[in-house]
Image (cartoon, rainbow, N blue to C red):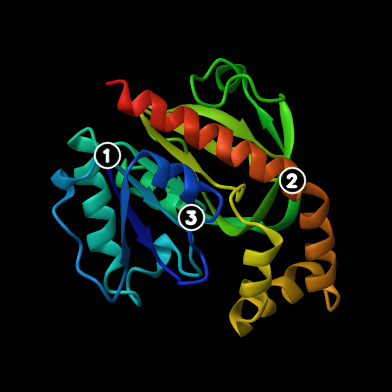
Amino acid sequence: MHFLELRHAQCEPPAAYAPVLESYGDVQTVLLGTDPLPDHRRFDAVIVMGGPMGVGDQGEVEWLTSEIEYIRDLVESDVPVWGVCLGSQLLAAALGARVYTGAVPEVGVEEITLTAEGRQDPVWGGLPSTFPAMQWHSDTFEIPNGAVRLAGSAKYPNQLFRYKQSYAVQFHLEASSEVAREWMELAEYRDSLHASLGADGPRIFMEQLGAAESQGLEIAVAVMEKWLKSISAK
């Protein structure tokens, strides 16, 4: 199989998702703002990762609008998309849903609760009905028309949706402590932690992630495996 990864920051790779993707085929990575977008018809699925920008930054980040249009073309061409954090918001925008800044940032490890539909979903069904997941976002999305809401958190009820074979995943299951430490090296990410969790934010965040990391990585591998199996069976 042939996969495309849309990356918005070098420090936000597919991480735990990557070995599963590579076991099914080859992965081409495009760094937005640097590399051109390839012909989407060449790929069996596309994974869209996170980044510090947002859908509302289209006036300042010139390639965001074209990326949203590209994702819309993917979905209309029945190329499955897996969107993570920013990627989930871009998928929502591509499907015509409103993406906006929420009342408060959601940073740290939060409990995710599957809906009744989530518990029956072919990819997410079979998981515990609640599980911890790392969060790092201020923006959120409404559920697009025709999509199914699969999970929420206490602060943000729209954390996960399915549209056909595409999934929007607001939270980070894929990121290990090692990946998170790379984020800490960037001033923009450290400032976000301080603003959300206080002066001791980096330590608090890493402690929370350390406690939830093992289960999160296990779930990341499980859901990616099930998603790719469902795609390859078509």
The reply to whether dot 3 and dot 1 touch (C-beta < 8 Å) is no
Kind of residue at disc 2: Ser
x, y percent for residue 209: 76, 56
Kind of residue at disc 3: Pro
x, y percent for residue 16: 56, 50
For label 1, the SS is: loop
Q: Is residue 203 left or right of residue 150?
A: right
Q: Earlier in the sequence, mark 3 or mark 1?
A: 1
Q: Nearer the viewer, residue 105 or 130?
A: 130
Query: Residue sitting at 48 percent across and 19 percent down?
Result: 122
Q: Give the residue at mark 2.
A: 214
Q: Give the residue at mark 1.
A: 1
Query: Residue sitting at 40 percent across and 26 percent down?
Result: 229
**Quarter occupied by residue 118:** top right
Q: Give the residue at mark 3.
A: 14
Query: Residue sitting at 84 percent across and 79 percent down?
Result: 199
Q: Which of pointers 3 and 1 indicates the residue nearer the eye?
A: 1
Mark yes or no: residue 78 visible. Answer: yes
For label 3, the SS is: loop
Q: Earlier in the sequence, mark 2 or mark 3?
A: 3
Q: Quadrant of the C terminus?
A: top left
Kind of residue at disc 1: Met
Mark 1 surroundings: few (<14), some (14-19) or many (≥20) residues within 10 A? some
Q: Is residue 62 above or below residue 204?
A: below
x, y percent for residue 8: 41, 67
Q: Is residue 70 left or right of residue 119?
A: left
x, y percent for residue 71: 27, 49
Query: Residue sitting at 55 percent across and 18 percent down?
Result: 117
C-alpha gap between disc 1 and disc 2: 28 Å
For label 2, the SS is: helix
> Looking at the image, which residue sits at the far front?
23
C-alpha gap between disc 3 and disc 1: 17 Å
